Image (cartoon, grey):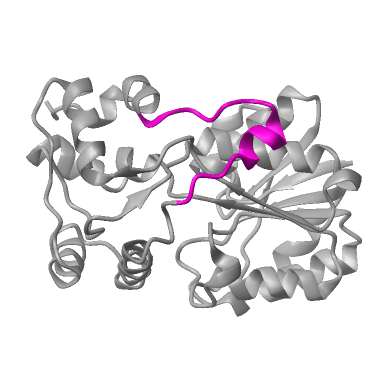
């Protein structure tokens, strides 16, 4: 049987695929563009179309599959959007679903991840929720443009701290639970980096790594929202979700350091300095 990895074209999903392949698992990579997945994985996995808004794609995606790594696509803001696929997993007899959730979600019913977790649990499908802290890739990805062009971290997180974790470590954690469904059934793991940093500390590390003076701007929510919608041209719904997450971050929800990644995998999580050094090109000046 195979492990179905949703969101396989993205950072976390891609790392889940790679970690599963290292252990000899058969993998089915799923996304809305199967051709893109074929190009990415070059024949090493089975690639299928899966669109959570099209139930006609469910059966083919689940064929020959007994475990699932489930990610909520960022553009699907309603938890109900994933319920039909969860129902399909139940009917298919999936032995374990590992859902990519959020750190602290068990005490925060506002993000859609909360209701998705609860729906999975109520379905009776064995589950292993992965609840990571903030991705390091947020800084090398969506927020990297301001770092490269303006030497600024433009994030409305105030004085809050975050225990950043590398998406590669998240992929390893998910692959670990999917490899042994009997052992990890009906569990949840909060995984973070080994340190909690505020964004001034992040700016200091990036300054030392890049050799440029990087500053943390600390914009207000309205300024941040207007900039990312009007100047960056990002989807309004997506930006609104990030505003909500940074609002919660200001309340201290992202600062906890957990040792569950090491307990789960036997490895130490990568530090932000190590990540910045290994991904220097993401923060370098554009030519």
125 is higher (above) or lower (below) than 193: below
28 is higher (above) or lower (below) than 156: above
Residue 55 visible, this angle: no
190 is higher (above) or lower (below) than 213: below
Is 267 contained in the magenta span? yes
**Quadrant of image for the C terminus:** top left
Instruction: Please state the horizontal and vertical placement of residue 97, each as a whole percent of the image.
Output: 77, 55
Which sits in the foreground, 277 or 160? 160
Which sits in the foreground, 247 or 59? 247
Give, as a single range, the part of the protein colored magenta.
Answer: 256-272
Q: Residue at x 52, y 61 (%)?
A: 73
Instruction: Please state the horizontal and vertical placement of residue 184, each as a whole percent of the image.
Output: 82, 47
Which sits in the foreground, 88 or 129? 129
Which sits in the foreground, 150 or 89? 150
Q: Residue at x 35, y 73 (%)?
A: 237
Q: Residue at x 30, y 68 (%)?
A: 243
Q: Is residue 141 left or right of residue 194?
A: left
Q: Is residue 113 left or right of residue 158?
A: right
């Amino acid at each position: 049987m195979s492990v179905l990895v949703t969101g396989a074209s993205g950072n976390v999903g891609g790392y889940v695929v790679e970690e599963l392949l290292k252990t000899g698992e058969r993998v089915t990579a799923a996304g809305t563009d199967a051709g893109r997945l074929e190009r990415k994985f070059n024949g090493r996995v089975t690639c299928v179309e899966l669109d959570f808004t099209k139930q006609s794609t469910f059966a083919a995606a689940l064929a020959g599959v007994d475990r699932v790594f489930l990610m909520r696509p960022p553009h699907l803001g309603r938890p109900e959007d994933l319920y039909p696929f969860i129902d399909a997993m139940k009917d298919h007899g999936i032995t374990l679903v590992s859902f990519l959730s959020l750190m602290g979600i068990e005490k925060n019913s506002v993000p859609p991840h909360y209701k998705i977790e609860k729906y999975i649990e109520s379905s009776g499908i064995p589950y292993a929720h992965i609840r990571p802290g903030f991705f390091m890739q947020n800084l090398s990805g969506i927020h990297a443009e301001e770092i490269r062009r303006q030497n600024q971290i433009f994030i409305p997180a105030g004085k809050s701290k975050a225990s950043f974790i590398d998406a590669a470590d998240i992929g390893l954690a998910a692959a670990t639970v999917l490899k042994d469904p009997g052992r990890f059934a009906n569990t949840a793991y909060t995984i973070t980096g080994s340190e909690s940093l505020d964004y001034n500390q992040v700016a200091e590390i990036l300054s030392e790594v890049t050799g440029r003076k990087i500053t943390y701007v600390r914009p207000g929510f309205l300024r941040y929202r207007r900039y990312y919608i009007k100047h960056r041209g990002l989807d309004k719904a997506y930006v609104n979700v990030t505003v909500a997450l940074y609002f919660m971050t200001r309340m201290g929800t992202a600062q906890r350091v957990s040792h569950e990644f090491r307990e789960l995998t036997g490895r130490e999580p990568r530090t932000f300095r190590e990540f910045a050094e290994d991904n220097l090109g993401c923060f370098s000046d554009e030519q």
